[in-house]
Amino acid sequence: MDLSKYIRNVPNWPKHGVQFKDITTLCKEAIPFRETCERIANQYKEKKIIKVAAIEARGYVFGGVVAYLLGVGFVLIRKIGKLPYTTIDESYELEYGSDSIHMHIDAISSGDKVLILDDLLATGGTAAAACRLVEKAGGIVEGLIFVIELTGSLHGRDNLKGYDIHSLIKMPVEDE
Amino acid sequence: MDLSKYIRNVPNWPKHGVQFKDITTLCKEAIPFRETCERIANQYKEKKIIKVAAIEARGYVFGGVVAYLLGVGFVLIRKIGKLPYTTIDESYELEYGSDSIHMHIDAISSGDKVLILDDLLATGGTAAAACRLVEKAGGIVEGLIFVIELTGSLHGRDNLKGYDIHSLIKMPVEDE
């Protein structure tokens, strides 16, 4: 199944010149949604993953299913200020300024093998911050997986050197 | 399995006097997370649901799994401004002021039977707005399900009269 045909391209969102890759058109169809989640889980089913950690909000849609399929717990990585208990946090650079994500301090135990999941790999800044969070908690980043990877000028994988990285759909970042 | 013992109570968050019910402690444990998702899906497996629609962000964690288990598509209801394509939107009242949620205009087809899912039923304002969104798109709200229902002074069910409502865990809203 060619999953890429279920991704909608939305031009000029969230700003002029950006070709936004919309995964909601994939999620709303039962068969490609199931296929996406199962492909991710199958990629890691032999790896003795202990936790799936996903980045809000779209990462949760797939991340919960993958945790379920692997029979492991699910960890919520959120934008700063969104989690109620004691957290650890990490910042990452944006085009202008910076932003932060956080995770509950007891979400991951020392030595846990963690799969990090998000819907999109663009610059890799958020994913790299997620890796630092998991490692700060004593976890081991067993891999990172993305539904879509933007190829071309963003070089997201350069921000994630040394990690095992997979993506299901590769799409060019450039204007179409 | 008593799912309520996996919910962490966080006092005075997000503000003084609120006893926040934290579901991350349930999600991070494989067995109660699986049990929660399967109980929700089992409640609706005979109802010929066509779509599961969940409210961001915690609703997505469970909602994706329930859609997977029911073999149906998943619809993202988001806070206003978060979806890239043409949307329909609905407002709801807050203690001070109001807020809005939206959904892609093509997320639900006319006649689709929809299960609406969120992690928490408090006042029911957001859930009622989600019902209006689904109905505006021509969908039929087959039911609403919540992981936690706050019982006591909030009367969330009064905002959702006429709908089929289920919750897995009932907890008092009052200070403990």
Image (cartoon, coloured by chain):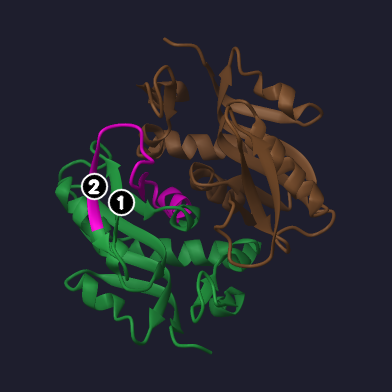
Chain colours: A brown, B green
Tell me if residue B79 can be seen. Answer: yes
Task: Compare marks 1 and 2 and give the one earlier in the sequence.
Answer: 2
Bounds of the magenta segment: B63-91
Task: Indicate the position of residue A170 as horizontal and vertical percent values.
Answer: 55, 19
How many residues crowd mark 1 within 10 Å: few (<14), some (14–19), many (20+)? many
Residue B101: mark in rendering: 1
Image x and y of residue A126, in percent: 63, 37
Q: Is residue B47 left or right of residue B169?
A: left
- Quadrant in which residue A128 is drawn: top right
B20 in magenta: no
- Looking at this rendering, what residue extends furthest in the front direction? A97
Residue B171 relative to residue B128: left or right: right
Rendered location of residue A5, percent (x, y) = 40, 21
Residue at the (58%, 38%) spot, across then down? A118
Could you say which is closer to the camera, residue A59 or residue B44? A59
Image spot of residue A36 (x, y percent):
51, 35
A92 relative to B79, above or below = above
Q: Amino acid at mark 1?
A: Ile
CA–CA distance between discs 1 and 2? 6 Å
Few, some or many residues within 10 Å of mark 2 (<14, 14–19, 20+):
many
Residue at point 43% right, 83% down? Answer: B173
Please tell me which residue is depicted at 27% across the width and 56% down the height of the picture.
Answer: B130
- Of residues A159 and A146, the one nearer the viewer is A159
Disc marking residue A35: none
Q: Secondary structure at mark 1?
A: strand
The answer to whether the residue labelled 1 contacts the one labelled 2, judged by CB atoms less than 8 Å apart, is yes
Q: Which residue is at the front of the view, A126 or A58? A: A126
Q: Is residue A127 above or below residue B157?
A: above
Quadrant location of the C terminus of chain A in the rendered image: top left
Location of mark 2 (residue): B89
Position above or below: A30 against A85:
above
User: Tag 2, which chain?
Assistant: B
